[in-house]
Image (cartoon, helix red, strand yellow):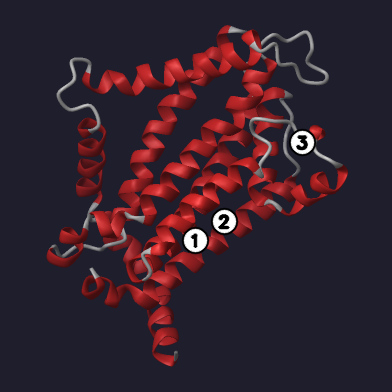
Amino acid sequence: MVSAVRSTWKFLSGLGGGLVKLLGYRDLLWQMIRTDLRGRYRGSLLGLSWTVVHPLVMIGIYILVFSRLMGARLAGHTDAPYAFGIYLCAALLPWNLFTEVMGRSTTVFLEHANLVKKMAFPNILLHLYVAGTAAVHAAIVMCLFLLFLLAVGQLPPLAALAAWILLTVLQLVLAMGLGLVASTLNVFFRDVGQIVTVLLQVGFWLTPIVYVADILPSPARRMLRFNLLARIAQGQQEAILNHGLPGPGLTAIVAVLALAVLAAGLACYAALRHGIPDEL
């Protein structure tokens, strides 16, 4: 226990130097991200164009099915034909980023065991590669969504748009921290990957993304205050649909907790990183 604490402290105390060291691998990191994006569509005629086609079709389905065909309406937006689709995409697109980072991070050491055991580079670079790849893909999807909002005259003002982006970035930081913990523990306890999959499924339905919180009974609505992901989703929906700003208290809470989880993930990795190659 004492040795683990010392190892954690040593790692965190040298974090600044570690970040500088990671900058030396920025070319490798970018190459890994490009290779991953190209590898998804290797051999196809359209190649990287599918990174635009897939999200464009996905957004179109969300908007048409939930707002038009199903006739879904939101209270206070009965005259807005696309309101429910916008409400859905405002939180679902960032949620997809969160789940991709969490899912891929959890198994990243196992999937790249040969690199971890044989190559001399910071293993944590694999987490940055996963987060970077997911962020690039999410940025494409979100830009297409914003173009749709512009086309239908529902683009939020700059302040609300900045708030949406900020909450999404903090959600990404939260996913990176949780992913660090999950990936490290998954090396030693392989059931962690299955547990994370189940928790993401449960978390999705505990978060008002495909439904509105108003349909829940009063006790369930009160419980949402303790669900950080639900608070983030509601802030994102408020910014995009109502063009409102989430309270500064919410943003501060999300920022503090996201950074705290990231620090905990780094500490967990620092304490156990030397045993990772042996377990692989």
SS assignment at label 1: helix
Seen at 35% across and 43% down, the residue is 132
Identify the image quadrant of residue 79.
Answer: top right
User: Could you tell me if the residues under marks 1 and 2 are in contact, i.e. CB atoms within 8 Å?
Assistant: yes
Image: 134 above or below 141: below
Q: Under tag 3, what secondary structure?
A: helix
Sequence-wise, the earlier of marks 1 and 3 is 3
The alpha-carbon separation of the residues under discs 3 and 2 comes to 23 Å
Residue farthest toward the bottom in the current orientation of the protein = 2
Where residue 192 appears, as percent x and y from the top left, is 43, 62
Residue 114 coordinates in the image, percent (x, y): 15, 60
Q: Which residue is mark 3?
A: 213
Q: Mark 1 to mark 2: distance in Å?
A: 6 Å
List the residue tagged with mark 1. Answer: 262
> As rendered, which of 141 and 197 lies closer to the eye?
197
Q: Quadrant of residue 237?
A: top right
Pointer 2: what residue?
A: 258
Furthest residue toward right: 218
Q: Please name the amino acid that badge 3 sits on.
A: Ala
Query: What is the crowding at mark 1: few (fewer than 14 residues within 10 Å), some, or many (at least 20)?
Result: many
Horizontal side, residue 167 vs residue 77: left or right: left
Image side of residue 73 versus residue 187, left or right: right
